Amino acid sequence: MQNSNQKLITFVIPAYNSAPYLHFAVDSLLPFGEQIEVLIIDDGSKDETGAIADDYAKTYPFIRAIHQPNGGHGEGINHGLKEAQGLYFKVLDSDDWVDEDALRKLLHHITTHNAWADLYLTNYVYWQGRNHRGQVISYRYLFWGKQRDGSWKNLRNFKYSSNITLHSAMYKTSVLREAKVHCPQHVSYEDNYFVYAPMPFVRNISYVDADLYQYLIGREGQSMENTTCIRKYFDFIVDGQLIFDAADLIKIRKENHALFRAMYHHLLLNFVMVPTFARLNGSPEAKEDLKAFWAHCRNSNPRFYRFVRSHWALISLTMPGKAGVKAVKFDYKLAHKLVKFN
């Protein structure tokens, strides 16, 4: 049962050298201080990020500034989860922001439904610069008719163009702690594991049809830039191994097929990125690392490894030789057209 004095949501903002834009994230949360807490995690920044965080904390009692040695985005999430006092836990990247009306709608839903859900889903919006609103990723299609609350079995199949992401998901803090979610240090894309690992611990799901998260893309140096993804191919491998090892989907398939369907969709979309970026990198090291990744999966769970590798998407991405590389490049271009995120 919720403590009457407990804040509804803890927003954790991992921030590294974010001084020029941190205010966009924090300022979007300022109208809701009575219902939320905000943790700004200064990740060993070398600019004025830490000082800006301290200034916010001095001015607003619901904001805390936490300083840590540089450990990466994932370590910021870990630190935030240790410190969080809110009923729900939401990560907001330091260059993104939330929509005020959408957050108000989400908070109203939590209070009127007595914090029933273990997982909340909301829509998010891609922005190409702060003045160019792009595609909205909506989860309305997952639900039948006007139904917006239920369990995994109440969801339709996920589309390949959408997935449960850090931007769309908000877990109960207690669920994340029960799942013992712990992100790796200095590894990008760890949010894919962060979203995946707690899924077996979710019983109740609510969807609020509101465009809450405003996701800025196209900023130089962002982790999702094509060149950055190719350079950081090994981070996808680390995340892929964490996801593969997080749960035995063969067992889950027997016990809860609806949960299996959702988790398998998430795993596949992340597994597709492993050979894609490793092969686009093309270095001898990338080739060896990719072999080691498949060997790890085969040794860890041979039955499920064979099941995953038999999927048509991975068959096409793992074809040997030049033909396989061409297939990777073609599939990558096609994925960009389907998702349309940059």
Image: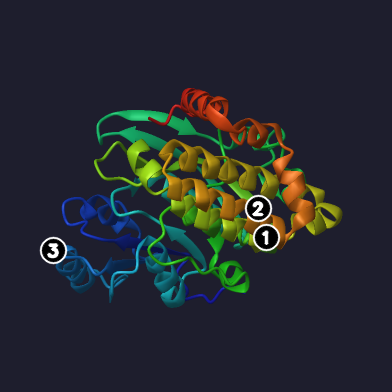
Q: Which quadrant of the figure contains the C terminus?
A: top left
Disc 2 element: strand
Q: Residues within 10 Å of mark 3 (few under 14, many from 20)?
A: some
Q: Nearer the viewer, residue 285 or 128?
A: 285
Quarter occupied by residue 19:
bottom left
Q: How is the image coloured?
A: rainbow
Discs 3, 1 touching: Cβ within 8 Å: no
Q: Residues within 10 Å of mark 2 (few under 14, many from 20)?
A: some
**Which amino acid, by three-letter code, is at mark 2?**
Ile
**Which amino acid, by three-letter code, is at mark 3?**
Glu
Q: Earlier in the sequence, mark 2 or mark 3?
A: 3
Q: Nearer the viewer, residue 229 or 295?
A: 295
Q: Position of residue 99 (x, y in %)?
A: 37, 44
Q: Which mark is residue 202?
A: 1
Q: Which residue is mark 3?
A: 48
Residue 72 appears left or right of 183: left
Quarter occupied by residue 117:
bottom right
Residue displayed at 79% across by 57% down? 252
Residue 188 appears left or right of 137: left
Q: Position of residue 168 (x, y in %)?
A: 50, 47
Give the alpha-carbon distance from disc 2 to disc 1, as whole Å.
Answer: 7 Å
